Image (cartoon, helix red, strand yellow):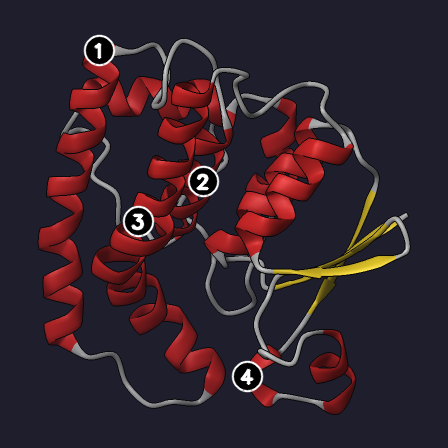
């Protein structure tokens, strides 16, 4: 059985979990307090970051590299298109959410509201929270623009780009930081993707001391 060292609300870990679940790969989840930098974990990943996946006798780090390994090793059902241009677009959007969206939104909202308290790093920075709340509106509008031209974010089929975006938004939805009424197309897209069997374990996550809102696990919002 594969083992994933993870943090439940980490969008990078959730991206890997969704990829594994979509491909029906049996998985044991092990929560890792990576910020404590214990020796055993540093031996698994000297970068002291999650996720870390143990699979096929290998220990893998870095979420996008892990997802691409999974895709090549377990190609069905596919999460990457075959055409080079289409694969580029998936990778571009994965980079968008894991870099730009993460830096402008996830790190400003999720990390301030949850991670700081869990890690004992003090109180949330209200300036960062306000900045993240402003930035997410722009990103939701960009997603709506993409969905006005495509069935899914990167094209006509669901891909890793959709799981990456959903990983970030689901973590933010856990703390009620997504205005689902801003863009109906984004809300409809998320309703479709969170109704997939692969999303079940994500929606079952409960962080002690931080209960999710009622709509979090509601497939109909």
The nearer-to-camera label among 3 and 4 is 4
Residue at which label 4 appears: 35
Q: Is residue 106 left or right of residue 120?
A: left
Q: Is residue 142 left or right of residue 102?
A: left
In the image, which disc is placed on residue 164? 2
Q: Are marks 3 and 4 in contact (CB under 8 Å)?
A: no
Query: Mark 4 or mark 3, which is nearer the start of the sequence?
Result: 4
Q: CA distance from mark 3 to mark 4?
A: 25 Å
Residue 221 seen in the figure: no
Q: CA distance from mark 1 to mark 4?
A: 41 Å
Q: Position of residue 212 (x, y in %)?
A: 45, 51
Q: Is residue 195 above or below residue 115?
A: above
In the image, which disc is placed on residue 149? 1
The nearer-to-camera label among 1 and 3 is 1
Could you tell me which secondary element the residue under label 1 belongs to? helix
Q: Are marks 2 and 4 in contact (CB under 8 Å)?
A: no
Dividing the picture into quarters, in which one does residue 165 lie?
A: top left
For the C terminus, the quadrant is top left
Q: Position of residue 150 (x, y in %)?
A: 29, 11
Residue 131 seen in the figure: yes
Binning the other alpha carbons within 10 Å of mark 1 as few (below 14), some (14 to 19) or many (20 upward) gives few
Q: CA distance from mark 3 to mark 2?
A: 19 Å
Dividing the picture into quarters, in which one does residue 111 lie?
A: bottom left
Query: Mark 4 or mark 1, which is nearer the start of the sequence?
Result: 4
**Residue at horizontal 80 percent and vertical 35 percent from the top:** 25
Residue at which label 3 appears: 176
**Residue at horizontal 61 percent and vertical 40 percent from the top:** 68
């Amino acid at each position: 059985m594969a083992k994933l060292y993870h943090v439940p609300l980490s969008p990078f870990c959730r991206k890997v979990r969704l990829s594994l679940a979509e491909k029906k790969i049996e998985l044991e989840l092990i929560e890792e307090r990576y910020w404590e930098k214990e020796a055993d974990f540093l031996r698994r990943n000297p970068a002291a970051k999650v996720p870390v996946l143990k699979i096929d006798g290998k220990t893998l780090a870095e979420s996008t590299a892990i997802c691409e390994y999974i895709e090549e090793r377990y190609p069905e059902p596919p999460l990457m298109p075959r055409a080079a241009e289409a694969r580029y677009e998936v990778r571009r959007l994965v980079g968008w959410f894991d870099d730009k969206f993460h830096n402008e939104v996830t790190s400003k909202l999720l990390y301030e509201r949850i991670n700081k308290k869990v890690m004992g790093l003090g109180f949330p920075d209200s300036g960062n929270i306000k900045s993240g709340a402003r930035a997410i509106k722009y990103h939701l509008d960009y997603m709506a623009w993409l969905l006005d031209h495509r069935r899914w974010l990167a094209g006509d089929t669901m891909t890793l780009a959709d799981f990456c975006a959903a990983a970030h938004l689901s973590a933010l939805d856990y703390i009620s930081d997504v205005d689902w009424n801003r863009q109906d197309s984004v809300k409809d897209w998320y309703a479709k993707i969170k109704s997939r069997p692969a999303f079940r374990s994500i929606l079952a996550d409960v962080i002690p001391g931080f209960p999710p809102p009622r709509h979090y696990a509601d497939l109909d919002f």
